[in-house]
Amino acid sequence: MPSPDAADSSRAARNETHHRVVVVGGGNGGISVAARLRRRGIKDVAVIEPRDEHHYKPLFSHVAGGTAPASITVRPQREVIPKGVEWIQDAVTAVQPEANAVVLAGGGRISYDHLIVCPGIQLDWNRIPGLAEAMQTPAAASHYELELAKKASRLLRDLTEGTVVFTQPDGPASCAGAAQKPMYQACDYWRAKGVLDAIRVVMVVPTETAYLAPFDEELQRKIDEYGIELRTRSVLLRVDPDAHEVVLGGQDGPEHLHYDVLNVEPPQSAPDWLKASELAAPRSSGGFVEVDPQTLRHPRFPNVWSLGDAAATTNSKCGGALRKQTWVLAKNLSKALRGKEPTARYDGYAVCPFTVSRSTVVWAEFDDKGRQKPTIPFYKHMYRESRLSWIFDRHVLPWVYWNLILTGRV
Ligand SMILES: Cc1cc2nc3c(=O)[nH]c(=O)nc-3n(C[C@H](O)[C@H](O)[C@H](O)COP(=O)(O)OP(=O)(O)OC[C@H]3O[C@@H](n4cnc5c(N)ncnc54)[C@H](O)[C@@H]3O)c2cc1C
């Protein structure tokens, strides 16, 4: 066996460094789990993250809906890197699990004892013909990217008449229900301005109902109240940005709709480099990282773990799920480092706070079978439209995110 010094110099010759735990992606999952590991006393943790900025994405819906300034959704990445964790500002382009190493866009290689894979989900703008082009035009936007969320905010604010179309994609998505959030806020605003009656609002969802059975009644009440046309079992097939027209694919065949404003939640999938990697499940995971959905450990590579939007878990992808997943993963990984079996289990919890007006929220908490799963078990009516939930979602949670979640405290 080579001495540690010899191993170091041989790695240096190959432009390779080594860390005990390497985290791919410094988003919600990566930073929180790295912070939790440090709190557990685990040393030599490195996070690979290419971007200078860290985003709190749940507020993008509020930005588009006109109830939050964009500035409060962003902080410099260096400010959120936990103390004692090394930040490698680069992007992973490939994983070599047999060699316990990842390859970087910058040309280097990092080897690891344990790897946590959480690079999030990929926005597939090019999957729908005309969609990417439409985003360059003045009438289309999306709150799934910050700059486009700012554009959506202006478009929705300035609309006084015409047709606005909101769409949610089929397939995996980060907080899929977020497609609806700016819509309700905009309707509330238009109603206050006295122009709601002059605006035709169409919401396109791939599901059979507005969302999930336990919350449908509450959402449908708001949909009726605002006079929204809900297209169920329908998806965006094509956009013609010059003609301001979308083609929807529904149960009754294609439907052509003129729009004055279009706000799209884009189709999403696992990052391409992950789809091509050995970490993806051989079948049917869509290229997301294969993990035991409870322990979050890879079944074929026991020193590989995954969580968040990039993991092939069974839950609805969201930050609320991560709050539980980071705790489970950090606990299980610290056990594995001590040579023990993982015992902590993630229970499939997810949450989607629907901002159904500019001051109320329908707080939808559910499990991976779509059943209600309230955080406060005896308070089953928490999903009802509520002002208190709004205050929590808009004002309390962002503070909790920056100060407690990203620092591994909750
Ligand atoms: C508009 C919107 C609204 C939402 N609303 C809510 C909500 O109200 N409640 C809720 O619970 N959840 C919500 N979510 C979902 C929540 O934001 C995500 O589930 C969460 O951010 C996922 O965390 P993650 O760490 O898996 O991915 P991300 O937070 O996306 O982080 C992934 C990180 O990996 C980095 N990365 C990407 N590729 C590479 C690479 N090759 N190498 C290294 N690093 C890489 C990225 O730069 C990024 O920083 C919302 C999401 C959106 C988009």
Image (spheres, rainbow, N blue to C red):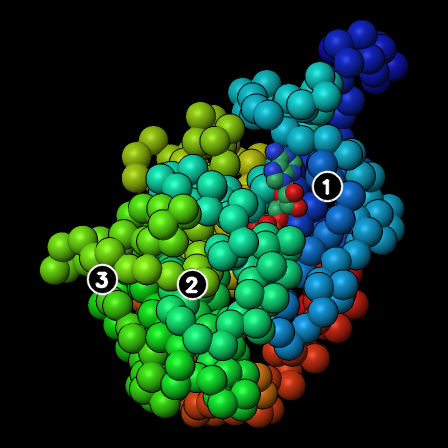
Q: Of circles 3 and 2, which is in front?
A: 2
Label ID, residue 332: none
Graded by Cα atoms within 10 Å as few (under 14), some (14 to 19) or many (20 or more), the crowding at tag 1 reads: some
- Which residue is disc 3 drawn over? 233
Sooner in the amino-acid sequence: mark 3 or mark 2: 3
What is the secondary structure assignment of the residue under circle 1?
A: loop
* Nearer to us in this view, 406 or 143: 143
- Which residue is disc 2 drawn over? 260
Q: Residue at x 51, y 61 (%)?
A: 318
Q: Residue at x 59, y 25 (%)?
A: 93
- Which residue is disc 1 drawn over? 51
Residue 335 visible to the viewer: no
What is the secondary structure assignment of the residue under circle 3?
A: loop
Amino acid beneath label 1? Arg
What is the secondary structure assignment of the residue under circle 2?
A: loop
State yes or no: Cβ of the residue under disc 1 lies below 8 Å from any atom of ligand 1.
yes
Q: How far apart are marks 3 and 2 (CA)?
A: 23 Å
